[in-house]
Amino acid sequence: MPASGVSAAAIAARLSDLGLPARVEDHDRHTSVEAAVPESLSADLWREVLETVAEADRFGLLATSLNDRTLWAVVRKAVPATGDVGGPSHQR
């Protein structure tokens, strides 16, 4: 498993331990973690949740008008040392 997958799995496990069951998804350039956030979390629990997702490269909270809230975190995969690192707009 790539390092991003290990880091994402650790974040997901910690969120689950805090009562926020999380799912991990592997993508081409990153591994993501998502967890549904209940309506009420104590300030202490929020602090622990934020400390947990702070281990990721990016994180955020998606809130909808239906009061659904999804916490997400992204751990980037390593950039290749050689080869095509120009991205999709790179001309060959």
Image (tube, rainbow, N blue to C red):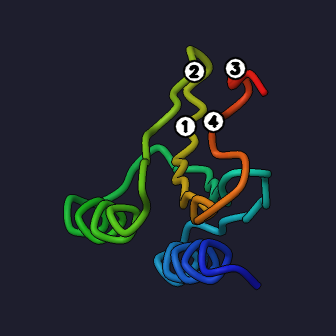
Residue type, label 1: Arg
Q: Using the image, determine if residue 59 lies above or below residue 10.
A: above
Which residue is the site of mark 4? 86
Q: Nearer the viewer, residue 8 or 76?
A: 76
**Residue 89 x %, y %:** 69, 20
Query: What's the CA distance linking mark 1 and mark 3?
Result: 34 Å
Query: What's the CA distance linking mark 4 and mark 3?
Result: 7 Å
How crowded is the residue under tag 4: few (<14 C-alpha within 10 Å), some, or many (20+)? Answer: few
- Comparing labels 1 and 3, the label whose residue is closer to the camera: 3
Q: Residue at x 43, y 41 (%)?
A: 60
Q: Using the image, determine if residue 66 lies above or below residue 1.
A: above
Q: Quadrant of residue 3?
A: bottom right
Residue type, label 2: Thr
**In the displayed structure image, the side of residue 81 where residue 43 appears, left or right:** left
Residue type, label 3: Ser
In the drawing, what numbered circle is on residue 69? 1
Q: Secondary structure at mark 3?
A: loop
Query: What's the CA distance linking mark 2 and mark 4?
Result: 35 Å
Query: What's the CA distance linking mark 3 and mark 2?
Result: 33 Å
**Residue 86 x %, y %:** 63, 36
If you read the primary sequence from the N terminus, does the residue marked by circle 2 or circle 1 appear first?
Answer: 2
Residue type, label 4: Gly
Q: Residue at x 69, y 51 (%)?
A: 29
Q: Quadrant of residue 32?
A: bottom right
Query: What's the CA distance linking mark 2 and mark 1?
Result: 7 Å
If you read the primary sequence from the N terminus, does the residue marked by circle 3 or circle 2 appear first?
Answer: 2
In the drawing, what numbered circle is on residue 64? 2
How crowded is the residue under tag 2: few (<14 C-alpha within 10 Å), some, or many (20+)? Answer: few
